[in-house]
Image: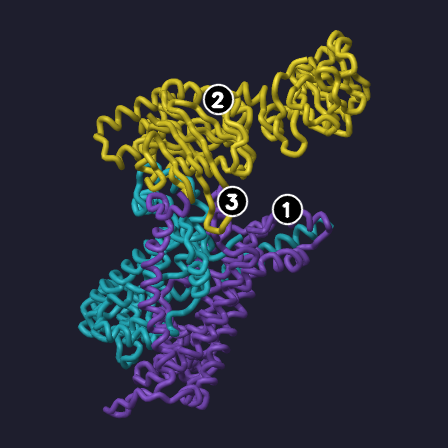
Amino acid sequence: MRETKEKRGVAFTIFVHMVLIFLAFLCLFFFYILIINSTRDHYQIQKGFSFLPGTHFMENLHNVLNDANIPVVSGIKNSLLVSVGAAVLATYFSALTAYGLYAYDFKLKKPAFIFIMLILSMPTQVSALGFVRLVEKMNMMNTLWPLFLPSIAAPAVFYFMYSYIQASLPMELVEAARMDGCSEFGTFNRIVLPIMKPAIAVQAIFTFVQTWNTYFIPALIISDNSKKTLPILIASLRSADFLKFDMGKVYMLITVAIVPIIIVYLLLSRFIVAGVTLGGVKE
Amino acid sequence: MKGRSGNKGVSYAKWGYIFIAPFFIAFFIFQLIPLVSTIYYSFFEYYRSGLKIIGPNPVGFDNYKALFDSDFLKYMGNTLILWISGFIPQIFVSLLLAAWFTDLRLRIRGKQFFKVVIYMPNLIMASAFAMLFFALFSDNGPVNGFLMSAGIIDKPFRFLSSVVGARGLVALMNFLMWFGNTTILLMAAVMGINPALFEAAELDGCSHLQMFFKITLPMIRPILVYVLITSMIGGLQMFDVPQILTNGNGNPNRTVTTIIMYLNNHLYSKNYCMASSVSVILFLICAVLCIGVYFSLNSGDDGMGGKKRKKKKGGVSV
Amino acid sequence: MASISFKHVVKTYDNGVTVIPDLNLDINDKEFVVLVGPSGCGKSTTLRMIAGLESISEGDLYIGDRLVNDVAPKNRDIAMVFQSYALYPHMTVYKNMSFALELKKTPKEEIDKKVHEAARILELEPYLDRKPKALSGGQRQRVALGRAMVRDPEVFLLDEPLSNLDAKLRTEMRSQIAALHKRLQTTFVYVTHDQTEAMTMGDRICVMKEGVIQQFDIPQKLYNKPDNMFVAGFIGSPQMNFLPALVEKAGEGFMLSVDSCRVPVSVAGLADYVGKEVILGIRPEDLHIEADMVEASGHALIEARIDLAEMMGSEIYLYYQFGGQKMISRIPSKYDVKEGDRVCLAPDLEKLHIFDKDTEKAIHQTLSV
């Protein structure tokens, strides 16, 4: 009796592992093909699929970086600029807002908090039209500013920061700083920010990745080739006559857009996976 | 001595306003003004006809009428189908994985590895992912090549020309991109349950399966609601994947055109009135869902509790 | 010169709750004053008003000769030790202690000298490079003290600084803080809810309840001559016994009777109470079981069946009922009293406390037979 139960347990454990391996395979397989194909030239790719990498990695990379129609180098630069800008603004100002609502008592405190909670999940797409019109009026079409300035108001990042600050900043610490003669901004910058470092790091990564990946709004704002970010460049590949393209280059461009993020992710994976749950949900 | 006012030195309320000001100013400029002007335009006639710009002339609810006479409802249906066919496997697999990962009796090897791998697609640029899928599943792409060389099919399957194929690919990508994220959220929720509850249930003679349905599921319900609603909002925003996969035309026969793709088309053709009425309807749906998120996150308290200000009873005007 | 003086100070929170209705309190220079009372009595609010962390709704607060109502905390020349210590977790012990001086732009050498001196006094020198996380509770407490010390403040504020320590460490730190006060020669204001801490440390003790000062005096006075039932009950452990007693005229003096117990007193103030009830207060150690005392006491005897006898080591606590009230006595442990025994206890007639039943105020004057 006991033995059969144990056997069943072993069989179940094996089953669980099979399912997990299958899912992991699904997640990894496409990236495997991507990497493989980015090392092969157009002709090899057309001929059929292979599990073994080719020898044309550098050649494909060279071709992608030097294609006049798809300015990849400036695309990377623009994407970096916008993503870093968004990450810095979103984390700093969200932390500031969270601290403001946590540490001070004022009349509009609760309404302000409820308001942010209500717009927590409101997609920016709903006001896309007005946003484009506004950017036109501000003469910022075809500039990178409108792609990261709105990050100052990032409700989801705020909520994460607020949860974190609640759990890790006793008011006595703020009061101690006041007694020590710190100004209010000084307290925030010298005491609160260092304590919030872990939360800021997690949110900076998430905001960076999100901004790195966004396509909808940038595509509406940017039309100038030299200002395009990576997602727009990839989309422009798709709209061009696809079949005439050098497939090695296509795969290489996708690799360039994806792989840096994956590398950073793998380096910080433990940290990021733990961070997913920190602010999003209580309990 | 009565009515002394102006405790400048020790009143900090103004700093609260100063600290939250940048957030609200940015919100006001970049989200509220655009939203209001979007709503405003939805009641006007304003579009380009050839080289001429028509309007803006006020037309009342005509835009909304025109919207519902167009294929809008069909695109709404598309969005719903695409979302649901990704979400159902996603929540199912995530619940299963969350239950497995948190089951202490089940010894899973390489738990951390699996967690890292299943979360990874969530960070991938959706447009690049879609481009990759397009390349892989194109008529003479590697997947067809693989299937043919394995002898499963004898001529290429045209994934992107069949309704099921195209919708299936979108659903598959959404599933891959989100099931890891959901698994991790649900896992955290399960691990937040007091272990004594499970022990008590076990003493009461609860079986494995009963435990899942009678304890785990009810306990993580708030998070399930949160996952459901945020996923719905995400589903409504679906754009990058179908847009790039179908090059914006939503083919075959516009069966994968989502609401935002429709909005995008109007924005590109500068048909502002239609674009804005689509936005407004989207906004209204999202507003309802946002209220849902609000309550799913604040069930039980006002969300501002837990403030570590011990001895200030009656002092916190929250 | 750093006396502290509250003149008709009122504290009302934004939500309309008044926690301090009208506070008048004068603390002398170099004095060690303890604010004590149950939680919610306004003692912490009072301390925080001195610190400037809490605004003053009405009235005036002076530190020295200076009106400080509108002065920011950093300009009041005060230092504060918090209950949770509030050490900056990302700074080393050294940085924690030097932070305030750095903000004041004190020269580097001077900071270094002051920090090392404080560290030497508090025996923290080996830990200067550590972060607070790597310290024990007692060490953190000393860092918090050190952080206040280096600033040479006019006033030292301490908000329940020992409540997070275990019992043994608390006793040790109590004497350390008292020694520190002697050494620094500055004004100390100390908040606690623990009457033992208050009694052992304070030059003067201010007992508060619901935002009102009940009594502000030296420890001996508080214990021997409490102004009202609240102070009498709050100070001393176990608590004072309270018995409702009827006042009768008896020759020159008066007779208080509770059940069969008749206690002669000669308090002039009782004249108005003849025929009425007052509250008789007797401390547990003032009820004697010694045979000679019992014999000498005549009718002033409390006879009861013991419900519970708790052996405390040198003493035994007796729990019983008398006159419808729960009573406690402390007797030397050489007397072998057990649960169920009937005993006679004689109150020390020199140490009786009498209170008005309605106002709960003490009825004083010449407590002698």
Farthest residue toward the top? C292
Measured in 3D between alpha carbons, the distance from the residue under mark 2 to the one under mark 3, in whole angstroms, is: 27 Å
Q: Residues within 10 Å of mark 1 (few under 14, many from 20)?
A: few
Chain letter of disc 1 in the image: B
Q: Quick one: label 1 or label 3, which is nearer the N terminus?
A: 1
Q: Is residue B198 left or right of residue C19?
A: right
Q: Colour of chain B?
A: purple
In the image, residue B248 sits, relative to residue C211, either above or below, namely below
Q: Chain of mark 3?
A: B
- Mark-to-mark CA distance, 2 and 1: 45 Å
Residue B54: horizontal and vertical position, in percent? 28, 90
As displayed, is residue B219 above or below residue C286? Answer: below
Callout count:
3
Q: Which residue is mark 1?
A: B196
Q: In the structure shown, which secondary structural element does the residue marked by tag 2 occupy? A: helix
| Three-letter code, disc 3 | Lys
Q: Residue at x 24, y 75 (%)?
A: A137
Nearer mark to the viewer, of 2 and 1 = 2
> Tags 2 and 1 in contact by the CB under 8 Å rule?
no
Q: Residue at x 21, y 30 (%)?
A: C107
Local secondary structure at mark 1: helix
Q: Colour of chain C?
A: yellow
| Residue that carries the numbered disc 3 in the rendered image | B313
Residues packed near mark 2 inside 10 Å, few (<14), some (14 to 19) or many (20 plus):
many
Residue C238 is at least partly visible in this image: yes
User: In the figure, the cyan chain has which letter?
Assistant: A
Q: Which residue is mark 2?
A: C201
C253 w.r.t. C230: above or below: above
Residue C344: assigned label: none
